[in-house]
Image (tube, rainbow, N blue to C red):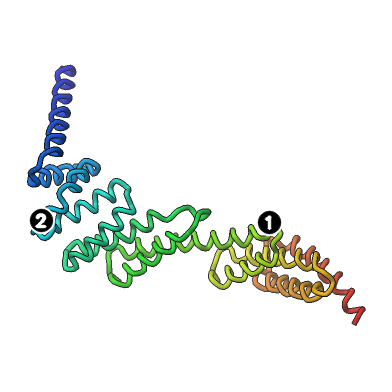
């Protein structure tokens, strides 16, 4: 019995493939639409996409065009072709501003940009674009059922930008470009005042300032030591029980000791 079921299944699969290939090569657009829709409903996005891509130009301006364009964009999204899906959903929204699918298409367009955002260690240009697109969606549909999801994506993407900015500033410190590190940490602390990395940023800003001061030429040393001392005070005021207390206190002892040289001179 199992053998016959296997043969029957194989026959159905081969027949289905044969029908698909035949429709794909045909010139009549009606069967392509019909089979493409069936495949779309079955989640066969790649096959449906191939059929739809052949007939999209032919349906432009026709009553079925709205449905076709929506399904075509969805197949791109289902195939994880997020560059194509963001474009196709935007195109759908522009072409059919009164569609009942407008809100969903607008959200999926913005979400496609979100899906294109790379890991924080890479260039974050696409992340910034994704945040803009998601915010535009929220502004356009403030009562959307997708509002919580869209807001969550923005928060996640902001986290990537935050991490990227922090790691850049820390890297400057690692390669001993202390002035660039201090400036980058200043920018980070201004841009992300509520960051969970704020304590770390303030410590490494102190660390960079301390190293810059201790290795400075004589004419710049006092001013830089005083700046480092202020960064120490900022850290201890902002985080009275900081995890960096031992390291920061040792730096402060060195700073105070060095500054004594200038108080005696004056």
Q: Specify few, some or many for label 1: CA neighbours under 10 Å numbering under 14, 14-19, or 20 or more.
A: few
Q: Position of residue 53 (x, y in %)?
A: 20, 48
Q: As displayed, is residue 200 above or below residue 31?
A: below
Q: Are marks 1 and 2 in contact (CB under 8 Å)?
A: no
If the image is split into quadrants, where does the C terminus sit? Answer: bottom right
Q: Quadrant of residue 208?
A: bottom right
Question: Where residue 15 appears, x then y in whole percent?
Answer: 13, 29
Q: Is residue 22 visible?
A: yes
Q: Quadrant of residue 133?
A: bottom left
Q: Earlier in the sequence, mark 1 or mark 2?
A: 2
Task: From the viewer's perspective, tell me whether residue 11 is left or right of residue 124.
Answer: left
Can residue 41 be seen here? The reply is no
- Circle 2: element type: loop
In the rendering, at what x and y percent does residue 8 appear?
13, 23
Task: Identify which residue is drawn at 11% across, 60% down.
Answer: 61
| Residue ranking furthest to the bottom | 266
* Nearer to us in this view, 247 or 224: 224
Label annotation for residue 64: 2
Q: CA distance from mark 1 to mark 2?
A: 60 Å
Which residue appears at 19% of the width and 64% of the height?
A: 95
Left or right of 160 in this view: 181: right
Q: Position of residue 115 (x, y in %)?
A: 38, 54
Q: Which residue is mark 1?
A: 174
- Looking at the image, which residue is at 64% across and 69% down? 183
């Amino acid at each position: 019995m199992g053998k016959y079921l296997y043969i029957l299944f194989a026959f159905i699969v081969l027949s289905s493939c044969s029908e698909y290939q035949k429709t794909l090569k045909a010139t009549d657009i009606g069967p392509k639409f019909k089979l493409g829709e069936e495949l779309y409903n079955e989640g066969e996005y790649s096959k449906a996409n191939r059929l739809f891509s052949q007939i999209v130009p032919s349906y432009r301006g026709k009553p079925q065009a709205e449905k076709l364009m929506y399904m075509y964009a969805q197949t791109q999204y289902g195939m994880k072709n997020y560059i194509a899906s963001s474009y196709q959903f935007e195109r759908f929204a522009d072409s059919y501003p009164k569609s009942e699918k407008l809100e969903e298409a607008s959200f999926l367009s913005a979400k496609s940009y979100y899906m294109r955002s790379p890991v924080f260690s890479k260039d974050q240009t696409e992340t910034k674009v994704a945040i803009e697109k998601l915010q535009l969606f929220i502004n356009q549909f403030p009562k959307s059922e997708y509002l919580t999801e869209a807001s969550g994506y923005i928060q996640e993407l902001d986290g990537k930008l935050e991490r990227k900015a922090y790691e850049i500033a820390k890297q400057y410190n690692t390669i001993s470009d202390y002035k660039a590190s201090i400036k980058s940490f200043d920018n980070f602390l201004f841009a992300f005042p509520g960051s969970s990395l704020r304590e770390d940023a303030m410590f490494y800003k102190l660390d960079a300032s301390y190293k810059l001061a201790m290795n400075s030429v004589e004419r710049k040393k006092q001013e830089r030591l005083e700046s480092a001392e202020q960064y120490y005070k900022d850290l201890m005021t902002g985080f009275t029980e900081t995890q960096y207390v031992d390291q920061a206190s040792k730096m402060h002892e060195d700073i105070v000791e060095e500054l004594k040289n200038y108080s005696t001179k004056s």
